[in-house]
């Protein structure tokens, strides 16, 4: 029974800290709005563009992708995108020798693999 009380007490303290933090954030925002500081921001009145692909991610995959991102794990599709870009850059200005042709062939295969994987994600919502 003592554990429940301690757990409740810890939960109540955490809740109180969060309320204090929310109150502080609210005060700071109110001060910024009153001083006009917020209106001078480039994004004032526009939706935030976080540039992290959240809006482009299918809704049913967002939570899983966010958990992976927060854990520092890169989804295989993103890793493949990075590999494609690295190969593409390495092939810029390459001649038409056998090595360059093999690299272009590999690039094409990787792009097809990515396209198929993304299409599967779009249509099924699963890996």
Image (spheres, rainbow, N blue to C red):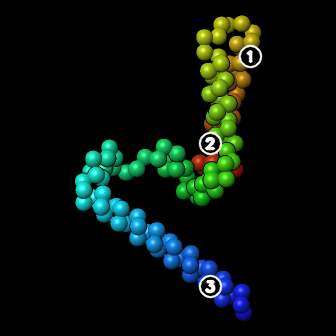
> Which label's residue is closer to the chain start, 3 or 2?
3
Say which element carries label 1. Answer: helix
Q: Compute the Cα span from label 3 to label 1.
A: 64 Å
- Residue 41 against residue 2 in the figure, above or below: above
Q: Determine whether, in the image, residue 86 is placed left or right of residue 30.
A: right
SS at circle 2: helix
- x 45%, y 72%: residue: 20
The residue positioned 47% from the left and 47% from the top of the image is: 50
Q: CA distance from mark 1 to mark 2?
A: 24 Å
- Specify whether residue 117 is in view: no
Residue 94: image location, x then y, percent? 65, 10
Residue 35: x %, y % from top left: 24, 56
Q: Secondary structure beneath disc 3?
A: helix
Q: Which mark is residue 8?
A: 3
Q: Residue furthest bottom?
A: 1
User: Upstream in the sequence, badge 3 or badge 1?
Assistant: 3
- Which mark, by number, is residue 118? 2
Q: Position of residue 8 (x, y in %)?
A: 62, 85
**Res. 115 in view:** yes
Q: Is residue 94 left or right of residue 22?
A: right
């Amino acid at each position: 029974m003592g554990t429940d009380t301690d757990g409740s007490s810890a939960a109540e303290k955490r809740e109180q800290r969060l309320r204090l933090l929310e109150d502080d954030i609210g005060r700071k925002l109110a001060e910024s709005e009153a001083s006009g500081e917020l209106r001078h921001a480039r994004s004032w009145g526009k939706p935030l563009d976080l540039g992290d692909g959240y809006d482009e991610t299918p809704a049913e995959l967002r939570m899983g992708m966010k958990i992976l991102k927060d854990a520092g794990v890169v989804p295989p599709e993103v890793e493949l995108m990075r590999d494609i870009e690295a190969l593409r850059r390495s092939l810029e200005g390459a001649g038409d020798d056998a090595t360059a042709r093999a690299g272009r062939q590999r690039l094409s295969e990787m792009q097809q693999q990515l396209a198929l994987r993304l299409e599967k994600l779009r249509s099924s919502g699963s890996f």
